[in-house]
């Protein structure tokens, strides 16, 4: 069977390029098509660097050729990523910090701080140097989740300047407005005061060398988010949602905020928290209380990576209440879920730094079975 190049190109014209309203051939994504008997080679250029986007493009090409041209065709797809030049993100970098990852959610109550704490603990367990900045000025939770609520940051002298020394536990450095307020004290600040407090915790802190600084952002898309993104060159953002439509609608807005042309922070992916309920006495059962795979479907719709799903189990709540992240448990399905989620986050950071202009000079190295970003 000798394949007809013209037929293959016509078949590829039926695949639409998301966001462009054009097909693969018309948009110029298909660079070349070569046939050798029953073999075909397609050279493709895409703008999305995620592994998910590459795989989806490859699958679509193979399917349309098999369906419309020859079902036994041997197909090879060569994919090259060419992203548009990214505008420089304004703001000061922090010496010694390689990657700054914002963890956000469109609405409250979806477990964003829990996800942040467990990703941080998992990164530290893997051997990375990690910090967490609790940027939720009005509802700080990191001190409780890391069992350091009764501690206070000390001042240290760094090159003749007085700096705050972050509190450390489980190998994670932590700063939070919660360290500077009483448990029964509400923070009643206008935006400028909140932004000033955050700037102090960011730039007047002795973070030292970090592979990852995780920013636990407040819910929504407001003043604090803009202040942080104006102050720091964010490597990428992780958006957390639960599966139900109310949360997904707000998660969609959260993704849109980072993708605004004036902001342009790469979205590393979406996490589905409380994906299903598993009772302790029935560990093999899954009950989809809030709906099934809503965040996963949203990630496919928005064409951003799906980073993983975390179940709703009692031990996560108990671990957060006692200040020991559930990810630190050994050899449990929950710890495995956080391990996989964290590896996916790291992989997306690596992919982002390979494909987009870096915020600082970087190189890829390997640590504890994962890739990290180093100077």
Image (tube, grey):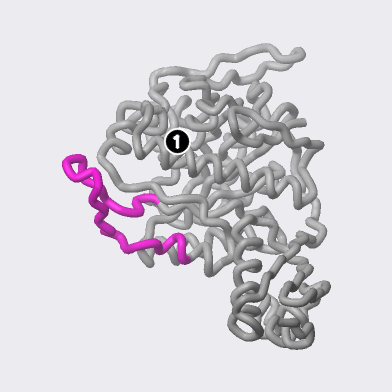
Residue 22 in view: no
Q: Quadrant of the N terminus?
A: bottom right
Determine which quarter of the picture holds residue 185: top left
For mark 1, what is the residue?
118
Task: Name the residue rendered at 51%, 20% in the picture.
Answer: 167
Q: Position of residue 77 (x, y in %)?
A: 72, 66
Residue 344 shown in magenta: no
| 144 shown above or below 278 | above
Q: Secondary structure at mark 1?
A: helix
Residue furthest left as drawn: 281
Number of numbered discs:
1
Q: Position of residue 127 (x, y in %)?
A: 57, 25
Residue 280 shown in magenta: yes
* Depth order, front residue of 184/79: 79
Q: Position of residue 201 (x, y in %)?
A: 60, 30
**Left or right side of 330 for 289:** left
Determine which quarter of the picture holds residue 178: top left
**Left or right side of 215 for 115:** left
Q: Quadrant of the C terminus?
A: top right
Task: Name the residue rendered at 28%, 59% in the picture.
Answer: 288
Q: Residues within 10 Å of mark 1 (few under 14, many from 20)?
A: many
Task: Name the residue rendered at 44%, 42% in the picture.
Answer: 115
Magenta highlight range: 273-297
| 21 shown above or below 342 | below
Q: Position of residue 314 (x, y in %)?
A: 25, 40
**Left or right side of 285 for 17:** right
- Examine the residues drawn in magenta and state their main secondary structure: loop
| 283 shown above or below 50 | above
* Depth order, front residue of 24/8: 8
Task: Name the residue rendered at 49%, 32% in the picture.
Answer: 122
* Depth order, front residue of 296/188: 296
Residue 83 in view: yes
């Amino acid at each position: 069977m000798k394949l007809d190049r013209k037929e293959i190109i016509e078949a590829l014209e039926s695949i639409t390029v998301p966001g462009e309203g054009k097909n693969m051939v018309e948009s110029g994504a298909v660079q070349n098509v070569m046939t050798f008997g029953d073999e075909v080679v397609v050279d493709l250029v895409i703008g999305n660097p995620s592994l998910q986007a590459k795989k989806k493009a490859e699958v679509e090409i193979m399917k349309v050729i098999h369906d419309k041209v020859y079902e036994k065709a041997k197909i090879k797809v060569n994919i090259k990523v060419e992203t548009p030049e990214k505008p420089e993100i304004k703001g000061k970098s922090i010496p010694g910090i390689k990657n700054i990852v914002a963890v956000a959610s469109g609405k409250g109550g979806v477990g964003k701080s829990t996800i942040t704490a467990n990703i941080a603990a998992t990164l530290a367990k893997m051997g990375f140097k990690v910090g967490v900045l609790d940027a939720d000025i009005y509802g700080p939770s990191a001190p409780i989740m890391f069992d350091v609520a009764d501690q206070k940051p000390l001042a240290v002298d760094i090159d003749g300047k007085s700096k705050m020394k972050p509190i450390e536990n489980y190998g994670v450095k932590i700063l939070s407005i919660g360290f500077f307020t009483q448990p029964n004290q509400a923070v009643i600040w206008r935006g400028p005061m909140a932004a000033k407090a955050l700037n102090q915790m960011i730039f007047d802190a002795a973070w030292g060398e970090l592979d990852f600084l995780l920013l636990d952002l407040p819910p929504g898309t407001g003043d604090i988010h803009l202040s942080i993104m104006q102050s720091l060159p964010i490597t990428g953002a992780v958006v957390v949602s639960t599966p139900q439509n109310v949360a997904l609608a707000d998660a969609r807005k959260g993704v849109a905020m980072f993708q605004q042309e004036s902001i342009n922070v790469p979205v590393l992916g979406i996490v589905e928290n409380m994906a299903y309920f598993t009772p302790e006495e029935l560990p093999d059962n899954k009950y989809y209380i809030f709906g099934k795979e809503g965040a996963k479907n949203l990630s496919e719709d928005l064409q951003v990576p799906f980073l993983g799903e975390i179940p709703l189990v009692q031990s996560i709540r108990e671990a957060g209440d006692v200040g020991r992240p559930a990810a630190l448990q050994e050899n449990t399905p929950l710890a495995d879920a956080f391990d996989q989620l964290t590896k996916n986050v790291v992989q997306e950071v690596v992919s982002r730094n390979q494909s987009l202009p870096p915020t600082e000079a970087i190189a890829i190295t390997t640590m504890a079975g994962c890739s990290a970003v180093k100077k």
